[in-house]
Every structure is written in C-alpha cells, then in structure tokens.
Image (cartoon, rainbow, N blue to C red):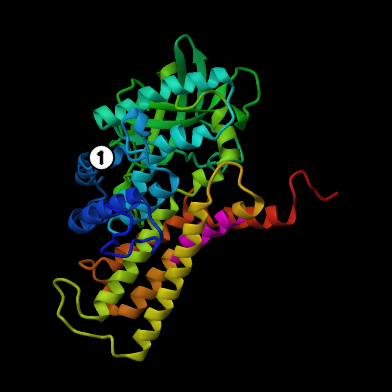
C-alpha cells in the first residue's frame, strides 16, 4: 500500500506519517478486528476462555511472525510497528491484544532488542544459532510463545531474584518453581520462563536471570487453578508449576546473564503492555460517539447528541484520547537502547498516562452513555473492566511507575542521602 494513500480509518495511535509496511499491517489488523475479533470478544469474556479462533486468524494472516526478522522468514516489523498494530488489535479485543503481546515480545526480545544488548562474540554466536531455532518454530509451525513473569514477589518488578530456579545439568537445565497470572496457560506451545540460575551455595542474584523456553509437553510441567478475574478474562492466566523440568541448552532464549543487561539497556521492552489499553480507550470513545449518534448496530436509532452535557463529555474524552495518543506515539518512536533520562521519564509517563487514562476514559464513556451502557450485551461494561486491569500489571504497575519517576527525578545514579 503506497504511503501516499490515506487509510480509510484513523488508527488507534492516531494519524502519523506511517511507512508503507505500517499502513498495510494496520489495515490488516483493523480488518481482522472489525470483521472477526469484535464479534467474538464477549464470548471469551463470558466464558473466561482463550481466543483460539482469533489466533487461527492471526496465524493465517502471518501476524504471529510479525517481529521475526525477514532473514528468518518473518515480516520484519520493528518495535514502533508492533506497538501500532497491537493497539489496533486492542481496539477490538483486549484479551487477544494482551496475549498477543506475550507472544510477539518473545520474538522482539530475541530479535530487535537483543541486537542492541552488549554480548561477547561467543554469546552473540550462541544467540544467533539458538534464535534461529525459535524463529523457525513460529514461522514454520505457527508456534505460540507465552511469557510468564509473576510469582507474587518483587521479582517481576526487577527488585529481587526470581523464585523459579534453573540448575545446570548435562545438556541443559532443571527448572523448579511456580508462576502465577501466566497468560496463555494451556494455549501456548512454549513458555518463555524467567528464572534465576541456581548456583548451589551462592546467594541468588537477579543478574543471574535466565530466559528459557519450556515446551508445553515437558514432563513435570503443570497448569492449575481457576481463572475468574474482574477483566481480561480471555487471557486465561492460570498458575504454572515446574517440578524438576528438564530444558535443553538450545531452549535458552537469551544467553546466560543477557536478560539482565537487556532490562537495563532497553526499558521500552516493558512498555509493550500499553498498546492494548490505548486500543481499549479508542474502543470506549468509538462506542460513545456511535451511541450518541444512534448508530450502534442492533440498538434503536435514538440520537442523544443534541444535549450539551453529552457534547461536553465527548469533547473531554477526545481531549484525553489525543493526549494519550501523542505521548504514546512519541515514546514509541524514540524507543531504543540506552535512552536518555528525559526519554526514560517520558516512557514512564506514557505508560502511566495510558494505563490510568484508559480506565478514566471508559468511566467517562459509561457516565455519558447512561444506564443502558451497563448492559452486558453492549461492550462498554467489558471495556471498563478490562481497562481497570492495566495499572495492576507488572513489571510497571501504576504505583511502581510513580515510584520510579519520583526517585529517578530526584536522585542521579549512585546518589544517596547520608
């Protein structure tokens, strides 16, 4: 699609001088969302079931290999392009966009992001060989990768070693531990598990974090627990357990010690949850406009747009949406390794603005549309519930972002009070 031809819709990220590839991918994501994902979203929410049908569509469209380099058979999309596409998917199904993030981030981390992380020649050669294996699974087999972080401790926030451990044995590792809130549980082919290397008597150290792909068929791997949360019910984020699970050396998604370097080098790797919620904010705004114009499919064509209170509310929503889009897009476009302090602060601010703003915009939408919007056959109550979940998600919850911003503004690296 030539860059000079405008899109027939305004993307969730707003207007921008998109590349030809970005326009093509945005149009594809919008079409899938509008024609397929939106109609199914209520089903995944009601049943707390995984959106398998949506993943079949993503696979058929080639979007599971979105960020796999072209040299490995993928679409070769860069970080900003992924963030734009993810926001467009989130506009139509939050659970699909959020779980899609876990999968695509597995290829982003091992691809574009790893290319910007310092490695020795030996590590680089090892990584090149191993990521070829993982990329081939996605491209050739349509494999889905999950990315479980949480354990109910400070580890996912980067403040402590992971309790899940991996001990070196001949030919690989023995993994033991547990993960909670593990999205794609039961749906992924491989689980990209962050764990701490067990060095025997040595004290566990977060610098020794390993990133291992545990095959879903591994003996000793288990899934348990219920999943009945407030929102994002289609993510099916149940508990994972690892009981002396053997993982071969080739299942390393990054060489030893490189994940820690990546987390310090590429903070934007933790911003990839935000597009889902920018998409949800767009959905709440879109619905409100359609509702007030009397254009919601299946509803009586009653117009409510003539009331000044409704007009003012829509204006407030649009102002907030434009603010979210602007800071999001700037943070995405300048993301890269070793950002400046201002860029890092802007990244935090963008994350907070989107995660808190999505719920605030959904709140305004419900208040503006009135009592009818509480009904479950309409999407607003689901959008509201889904939107509330973003600020709770590690590693950058809303509370942790505020803490980081305040501390890193007032203290330079290495400074402390006597």
How dense is the environment of label 1, judged by Cα within 10 Å: few (below 14), some, or many (20 and up)? some
Question: Is residue 127 placed above or below 91 in the rendered structure?
Answer: above
Q: Is-magenta flag for residue 184?
A: no
Name of the residue lying farthest toward the right: 418
Magenta portion: prevailing SS class: helix
237 above or below 354? above
> Where does the image place residue 225, in percent across and percent down from the top left?
34, 40
Q: Residue at x 56, y 35 (%)?
A: 262
Q: Nearer the viewer, residue 348 or 30?
A: 30
Viewer can see residue 243: no
Residue at 58% from the left image edge and 53% from the top image edge: 400
Total numbered badges shown on the rendered structure:
1
Please identify the residue farthest to the top as the structure is shown.
170
Asked if 343 appears above or below 367 in the picture, the reply is above
On the image, the x and y values in percent for residue 16 come to: 41, 61
Q: Which of 380 and 154 is in front in this view?
A: 380
Q: Give the quadrant of residue 387.
A: bottom left
The residue under the point 51% across, 58% down is 330
Q: In this view, does 122 lie to the left or right of 283?
A: right
What residue is pinned by disc 1?
62
Q: Is residue 117 visible?
A: yes
Span shown in magenta: 345-357
The answer to whether 353 appears left or right of 202 in the picture is left
């Amino acid at each position: 699609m030539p860059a000079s031809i405008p899109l027939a819709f305004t993307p969730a990220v707003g207007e921008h001088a998109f590349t030809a590839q970005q326009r093509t991918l945005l149009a594809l994501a919008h079409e899938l969302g509008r024609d397929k994902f939106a109609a199914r979203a209520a089903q995944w929410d009601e049943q707390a079931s995984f959106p398998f049908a949506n993943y079949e569509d993503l696979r058929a469209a080639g979007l599971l290999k979105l960020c796999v380099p072209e040299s490995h058979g993928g679409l070769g999309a860069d970080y900003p392009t992924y963030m734009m596409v993810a926001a467009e998917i989130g506009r139509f199904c939050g659970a699909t966009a959020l779980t899609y993030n876990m999968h695509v981030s597995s290829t982003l981390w091992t691809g574009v992001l790893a290319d910007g992380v310092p490695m020795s020649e030996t590590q680089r050669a090892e990584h090149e060989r191993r990521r070829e294996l993982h990329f081939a699974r996605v491209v050739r087999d349509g494999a889905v990768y999950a990315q479980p972080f949480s354990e109910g401790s400070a580890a996912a926030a980067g403040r402590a070693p992971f309790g899940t451990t991996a001990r070196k044995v001949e030919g690989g590792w023995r993994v033991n531990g547990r993960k909670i809130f593990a999205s794609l549980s039961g749906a992924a082919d491989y689980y990209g598990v962050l764990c701490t290397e067990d060095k025997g008597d040595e004290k566990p150290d977060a610098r020794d974090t390993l990133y291992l792909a545990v095959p879903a068929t591994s003996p000793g791997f288990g899934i348990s627990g219920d999943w009945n949360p407030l929102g994002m019910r289609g993510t099916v984020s149940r508990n994972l357990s690892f009981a002396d699970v053997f993982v071969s050396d080739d299942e390393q998604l990054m060489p030893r010690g490189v994940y820690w370097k990546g987390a310090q080098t590429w903070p934007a790797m933790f911003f990839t949850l935000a597009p889902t919620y920018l998409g949800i904010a767009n959905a709440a705004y879109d619905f409100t406009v359609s509702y007030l114009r009397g254009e919601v499919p299946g509803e009586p064509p009653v117009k409510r747009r003539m009331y000044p209170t409704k007009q003012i509310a829509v204006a407030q929503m649009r102002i907030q949406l434009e603010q979210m889009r602007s800071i999001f897009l700037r943070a995405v476009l300048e993301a890269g390794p070793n950002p400046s302090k201002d860029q890092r602060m802007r990244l935090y601010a963008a994350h907070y603005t989107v995660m808190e703003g999505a719920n605030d915009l959904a709140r305004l939408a419900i208040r503006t549309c009135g009592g009818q919007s509480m009904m479950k056959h309409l999407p607003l109550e689901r959008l509201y519930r889904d939107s509330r979940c973003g600020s709770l998600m590690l590693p950058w919850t809303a509370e942790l972002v505020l803490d980081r911003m305040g501390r890193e503004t007032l203290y330079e690296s290495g400074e402390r009070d006597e």
